[in-house]
Image (cartoon, rainbow, N blue to C red):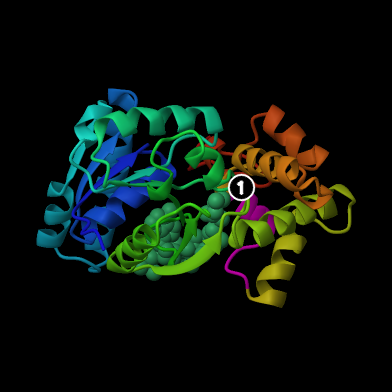
Amino acid sequence: MAKIERVGVVGCGLMGSGIAQVCAQAGFRTMVREVSPDRLEGGLRSISKRLERLEDKEKINAAEREAALARIDGTTELADLAECDMVIEAVVEDLEVKNALWRELEAICSPEAIFASNTSSLTITEMAATTGGRGRLIGLHFFNPVPVMQLVEVVGTIETNHSVLESATDFVRRLGKEPIACRDASGFVVNRLLVPYMMDAIRMLEQGVASAEDIDKGMQLGAGHPMGPLALCDFVGNDTLARIGDIMYEEYRERRYAAPPLLKRMVSLGRLGRKSGRGFYEYPEDGG
Ligand code: 3HC
């Protein structure tokens, strides 16, 4: 089993910054790459703020916060990931973009490095098929907010080396997260169930069955969910959800994955959820 010490994270947005944070907190040397200095700075600032909040809440002490920050380096150059034993990508959900990235990383990293995609809905096989090192490409699917959510889906293809999956599962445990093993099917376990549920909640709103508030209250108080499905749509991002739904619909051709018209209209109007300040609800302090 390969020993993982240095981790590269490509993308320092919502997911990438969370992944980099948990890697650094777990003691891994972490190199984060963003495409521009502005985006890199924004991502690193969000990590720093979250660590400060953890210190304020006395979940970590000042020395732990400083040590975690000291373990993270930022770069805009992919070549700086050359020494990484594990590279996790959390870039845009676009197969062409991800495949181009893997091809570049193949030329940079050691042949033993493990490549992991945080894709929500694309298949790992479609990525592995375009790279030379099919045996080392896996899915490591984290959940938002990454520092809070306990689960990571560990996904292998029919060509993934067993030792790579073992190392990745051990890595997930070292992050303090719980792994589950999944076959490479679009949406894996969680999104396969969660996406149709969220789409159904939007259809229910479209049909006027109940108000957004009452649909959400129903699932919070009647089924014990931490947030209702429409609040969750806003939390994930309505554009992200529509994109995931499109990819899953393309894969399975089942209507339950397809974005309902209301979701598409909301995306067209820029009502993306928390990040834009307005979605099914209003968030004046978040993005507006
Ligand atoms: N980043 C880091 N920590 C956060 C956070 C964030 N964005 N949001 C909340 N937290 C922390 C808080 O600091 C707090 O920590 P503490 O207990 O140590 O004080 C804890 O989470 C609880 O937060 P709050 O008390 O403010 O609020 P809630 O109790 O309502 O919890 C929540 C917030 C954790 C987001 C909870 O509502 C929840 O679990 N919601 C469901 C989230 C979910 O389903 N995520 C999966 C989305 S699907 C996905 O990611 C897959 C992708 O492919 C689409």
Q: Is residue 48 above or below residue 3?
A: above
Q: Which residue is mark 1?
A: 234
Q: Is residue 139 above or below residue 269?
A: below
Residue occupying the point 20% across, 32% down? 80
Q: Tell whether 16 sits left or right of 242.
A: left
Residue 226 colored in magenta in the image? yes
Residue 34: image location, x then y, percent: 32, 30
Residue 127: image location, x then y, percent: 50, 39
Residue 211: image location, x then y, percent: 80, 56
Q: Would residue 147 be visible to someone looking at this image?
A: yes
Instruction: Say which quadrant the N terminus sits in.
Output: bottom left
Residue 63 colored in magenta in the image? no
Q: Would residue 34 be visible to someone looking at this image?
A: no
Residue occupying the point 36% across, 50% down? 18
Decide which of 147, 218 is in the foreground and name it: 147
- The span picked out in magenta is 225-235
Q: Classify 10 Å Cα crowding around label 1: few (below 14), some (14-19), many (20 and above).
A: many
Which of the 4 image quarters holds residue 149?
A: bottom left
Which secondary structure, mark 1? helix
Decide which of 263, 94 is in the foreground and name it: 94
Name the kind of residue labelled 1 in the image: Asp
Residue occupying the point 89% across, 52% down? 208
